[in-house]
Image: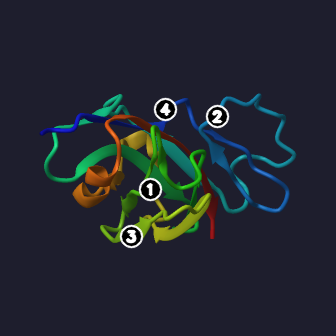
Amino acid sequence: MVRNILAFLAIAPIAAMVFPAASGHASATLLPAPMAPSPVPVHSGPRADLKLYAHSAHTVWSGSGDAWDAVDLCLASNTGRYRLRIASQGGGSLMGPGKLRYTISLTDGAGVSHEVTLEDQLLVAIEGQAPADASCDRGPNATLRLRAPQDELLKGQAGRYLDRLRLTIDPL
């Protein structure tokens, strides 16, 4: 018997915006928000940029192996270091007829891989490096992979599973 599970890992590819603040903290969110006037020039102080590139809308699991999806993105910080916060709307699980755990893996601009199993966490933070001269005008420099292991998928009921992620980046 083959279970058909449609795993939809939504990472809303709405234009990322940078919001500099007086403290030097910058945030790029994936949810639409009005751009407020900046109290300081965009080029002063530490800042970080985040940009998402096209990805598949959903993953269909065929009944064997792990289910995974990936999205290319650009992570840039004029300090060379950043903290990427990943907030899960599903409470750190794929939500559907049941709950399924999954893993997030980020390969950053320096080629370093960071892997985190969400395990019902609402928020995870990954610190990484990008060349100080990295620019999101040059295309993607990192990949975010989402993987649901086969043993977890076999425990779940057939159906549609979803988690929506919100990404925020800060310079370090």
Q: Quarter of the image containing the N terminus?
A: top left
> Spatial distance from mark 4 to mark 1, Cα to Cα?
20 Å
Q: Tell whether 84 sits left or right of 10.
A: right
Q: Name the amino acid, label 4.
A: Pro
> Spatial distance from mark 2 to mark 1, Cα to Cα?
24 Å
> Spatial distance from mark 3 to mark 2, Cα to Cα?
24 Å
Query: Which residue is tagged 4?
Result: 13
First in sequence: mark 4 or mark 1? Answer: 4
First in sequence: mark 3 or mark 2? Answer: 2
Query: Which residue is tagged 3?
Result: 114
Please tell me whether residue 121 is drawn above or below residue 62 in the rendered image: below
First in sequence: mark 2 or mark 1? Answer: 2
Please tell me whether residue 42 is drawn above or below residue 22 in the rendered image: above
Query: Neighbour class for label 4 at 10 Å: few (<14), some, many (≥20)?
Result: some
Q: Name the amino acid, label 1.
A: Ala
Q: Tell whether 36 sits left or right of 167.
A: right
